Amino acid sequence: MLISLATFEHLPIRVGGLAEAVTSLGEALQKQADVMILMPSHGLLQDEEVKKTLKPEKYCDYRIFVGDNIFPVTVYSAARKGVRMFFFSNEVLDHDKVYEPRHIFIQKMVHFTKAVPGLINMMLKIEQQKPDIIHINDWHCVFAGVLVKKYFQVPFIFTIHRLCHEKISSHELAEVNLGELIDHRFLEGDMFNIEKFGAHHCDRLTTVSYTYLNEEWRTFFSTFDGKTTYVWNGTDYTFWNTNDLKNAHLSRAERKKMLLKENNMEDGVFFFNVGRLDVAQKGVDILLGAFEIIMRGEVPGSEKVQDKIRLVLLGSGDHHLENEARRLENLFPKNMKAIIAYLGRETTREYYGAADFCLIPSNFEPFGLVQLEAMCMGCIPIGSRVGGINDTVLDFHDYPEESTGRLVPPRNSTALARAIVEMAQFSLSGQGDEVLNKMRARGREHVIQNFNWDKAADRYMTVYNNMSSIKLPFVSYSEPY
Ligand code: NHF
C-alpha cells in the first residue's frame, strides 16, 4: 500500500505538535507500508544543513494555472528512514514562514492544492503508480485531498489535529480558478468553510483523541458521525528517556538541585511549564494567575508551601504573557524563572528529567505531547481535564492505584493553584515520596504501552482499510471504544 501524507509541517519544518505527529506517524507507517510525504518546501531546500543531510534531488517539474498566471513547480524528493518526502517548490511554495503572512499562506495553499494532483499525474508517468490513500492533515491540505479523490479516485482520509473553523471567500477561490470546489452548502455568507467541506468529502474523518471528539461533537463532528473516529497520537519514548540525560548517573533529587541552581534558585518543589506562551489554547495566563494566587497566600495551605515553590517557564510567544512572566519573576525571584526561548529538545529533556511536576494548563488540547513527554521522563503532569490530556493522564484521586498525574478543571487559576499546593504539600510531607515515585514509574509504563507510534500506525491502517470502529449516534459517548 502506498500512503501519501499531505501536511504543512514535517520535521525539520516545525511550528507545533503537528510536525512531530506527522513525522513520527510516517516513520511508523513505513514499517508496514510505503509512505510519501507531500509538503511545500517552505524554503527548506535553501538550508545548508538540509542539503547536507537529506540531499534532496529534483524529481520532476511541471506548470500550474493560478488565475491568469502560469507558475512553474519543481518537486524535489529525499528519503529519511525509508519515508519518501516530496517538497514542492516555486516562488510561493518556497516562502520560509509556514503560516505567515496570511495572504502568502493562502497563496501557498492554492499552489499546493494544484501542485499535489500535478505530482500524482507525473508519478503515473514516471513510476506507473499512484498513492492508494491520500491522508490530509488539517485544513490547509483539504482542497488537495478533494481534487486527488475527484481526479484519481484515491480514498481521502481527513485528520483534524485542531479545529480552526477556517474560511475562505468564494470569489477568492473562483479567482484562482478553483471555482469547481465551491459548494453552496458550505457557504456562510460569501465565506466557504474549509473543514466542513473536507469532512463532507472525505472517506474517513479522524481526530486525535476521544475527549476532543466528544468536546467538539455537537459543534462539528456529529454532522459526519457515520465516518468519524479518533486515533491517538504516540510519543517517541526512546528519545524521552532519563538514561540519555547529561547527568543520568545522578539521582533525580540531585539533578533537580543542580538545575535549580543554574536558574539561581535554591532547592524546593520544582514545577515546570514548557511550550508556546499563549492564552487561547495553552492557557499560560491561567498558570501565571495560579502562581500569583499561591504567592499571595490566597488559597488554603499556600502559606505552608510558598517558600518552597519553584517554577520554571520555558517558551516564547505572546508578548503580553512574556511581560507578565517577567513581572512575576521580578516580584518573586526566589520562586520563579522565565526562560523566554526555545532551547531545543535536548535541553527540554533535562528539565523534564529534573522537575517534580509539569504544569499543562491548556484550555483545550486535541491531543498534546507535553504530558506524554513529561510522563516518559518521570515528571508528573498536572494538567487540565481536556482533550488528549484527559485521555492520557490518570488522575491521582480518580485512580489512586493507577494514577500517573493530576487533572484539574480548565480555565480556572484557583483550581490549578489548589492542585499545585496539594501536590507541593504531599511532596514536602516526606510520606509522599513512595507514592510519587510509583506515579513516575507508572507514567512511563502507561505511555510506552498505550501511546506509542506503532499503535497509532496500526489504528490508522484500520482506518485506511475501512476496518475501524466509528462513532455512530447509537454508540454510547461515555466509553472509549
Ligand atoms: O498534539 C498533533 C497536535 C496535537 O494538541 C495538539 C494540537 C495540534 O493542538 O496532533 O496537533
Image: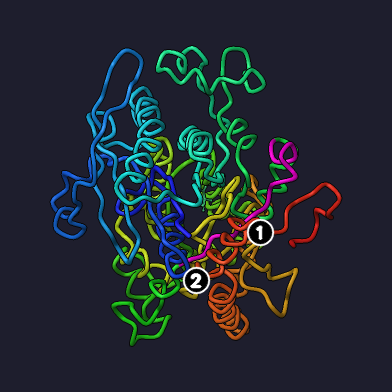
Marks 2 and 1 in Cβ contact (< 8 Å): no
Which residue occupies the foreground of this view, 104 or 467? 467
- Mark 1 crowd level (few <14, some 14–19, many ≥20, 10 Å Cα): many
Residue 55 placement, left or right of 290: left
Nearer to me, 17 or 295: 17
Q: Which mark is residue 379?
A: 2
Residue at (42, 81) in percent of width and height? 252
Q: Quadrant of the C terminus?
A: bottom right
Ligand 1 within 8 Å of the CB at mark 2:
no
User: On the picture, is 258 further left or further right than 423?
Assistant: left
In the image shown, does 293 or 67 lie closer to the viewer?
Answer: 67
Q: Nearer the viewer, mark 2 or mark 1?
A: 1
Query: Disc 2 marks which amino acid?
Result: Cys
Residue 291, position as x, y percentages in the image:
53, 52
User: Which residue carries the number 1 mark?
Assistant: 390
**Residue 36 image point, x, y percent:** 38, 54
480 in the magenta segment: no
Residue 255 drawn above or below residue 213: below
Does residue 183 appear in the picture of this structure? yes
Q: Which residues are magenta?
A: 220-235
Examine the rendered structure and indicate whether residue 363 appears above or below residue 273: above
Three-letter amino acid code at disc 1?
Answer: Asn
Q: Residues under labels 2 and 1: Cα distance? A: 17 Å
